[in-house]
Amino acid sequence: MSLNKGFMVVVDISGYTTFIRAHSRTKKPSLFRKVIEKINDGHGEHIISDLLETVINELEGTLTINKLEGDAALFYAIPADPTDFSKNLIRKLENSIDIFNKRINELLFIQACPCIPCNEIVNLRLKCFVHYGDFLIKKVSRFKEIAGENVIILHRLMKNSIPRNEYILFTQEAAKVSAIDELKNVEIRTEKLDDFGKMQVHVHYPFAEEFKVQKPSVFVRLKNFVPMRRYFSNKKTEDKLKEKLSFQ
């Protein structure tokens, strides 16, 4: 176990958890809906795994992937010069949001499927959380895992009062060592964290307007039915993504 100082980053796909909860509250799904859900079981996990892999590929080489957390991923970096490193980190996180949105556009053909996850893909967005401070790297079995109070703070910030679903959040500690002065559309606000009290954060909105897509027509859905079935034939799961990234 070793103590290190550096950046901790979480990328989180927003919108999917809300949809899952809303769907689970449906009292009496119709027989047709039950059949559709049975046929298309696993589409939600496939979509999230695809989108997370897209983001991870963009951040690879800048950040070290540490853990997959459902619809989120935890990274870290231990740079010699945090401020200089932050310039590339910010650029990569902005690119990740842009690439994430482009991937959603590429996957709109899956709306040929009537299941809820395939049609809710238009509501998914990417949020990024950046913290800087001390953390432990401990070995668990054959793998390394980061831990400590700052890792907990980073995760607590994922539950906040920010009304938008697409942004990059910097803690005060991260902002002090990052080149955020060069950024536009930065809001300074205070968030209240359980067990840690009030904390000032800097929230960067990369785009003036949130990414929007239109749902396809019935004709387009029918035309995309075969490509949709082909896309889901090679099932993607969190476990397969972990295996590909060489950790469990």
Image (cartoon, rainbow, N blue to C red):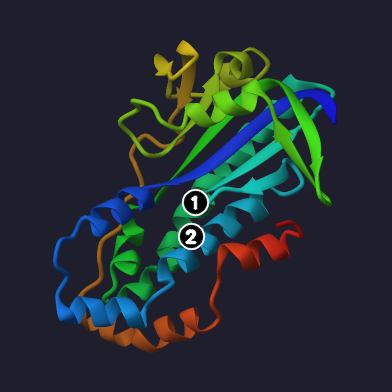
Determine whether 121 is above or below 136 in the image: below
> What element does badge 1 sit on?
loop
Give the answer, above or below, for where 198 lies relative to 52: above
Q: Dividing the image into 4 quarters, which one contains the C terminus?
A: bottom right
Relative side of 200 to 1, left or right: left
The N terminus - image quarter: top right
Q: Is the residue marked by circle 1 packed among few (<14), some (14-19), or many (20+) residues within 10 Å?
A: some
- The numbered dot on residue 246 is none
For the residue pair 10 and 247, the one nearer the viewer reads as: 247
Left or right relative to 97: residue 26: left
Residue at figure coordinates x 33%, y 58% from the top left: 122
Tell me: residue 95, above or below residue 200: below
165 versus 214 height, above or below: above
Q: Which residue lies furthest to the bottom in this view?
A: 226
> Which residue type carries mark 2?
Ile
**Which disc number belongs to residue 48?**
2
Q: Which residue lies at the image location 31% right of the left edge and 48% below the top edge?
A: 18
Report the side of 67 relative to 142 (left or right).
left
Report which quarter residue 160 is drawn in.
top left
In the picture, measured across the screen, residue 170 lies left or right of residue 27, that is right
Q: Mark 1 points at which residue?
A: 71
- Image coords of residue 233 (percent x, y): 50, 84
Q: Residue at x 64, y 63 (%)?
A: 241
Q: Would residue 220 be seen by someone viewing this image from the given angle?
A: no
- The percent position of residue 240, horizontal first and vertical second, equals 64, 68
* Residue 3 in the image, given as x and y percentages of width and height: 82, 23
Q: What residue type is labelled 1?
A: Asp
Q: What element carries label 2?
A: helix
Contact check, label 2 and label 1, Cβ < 8 Å = yes
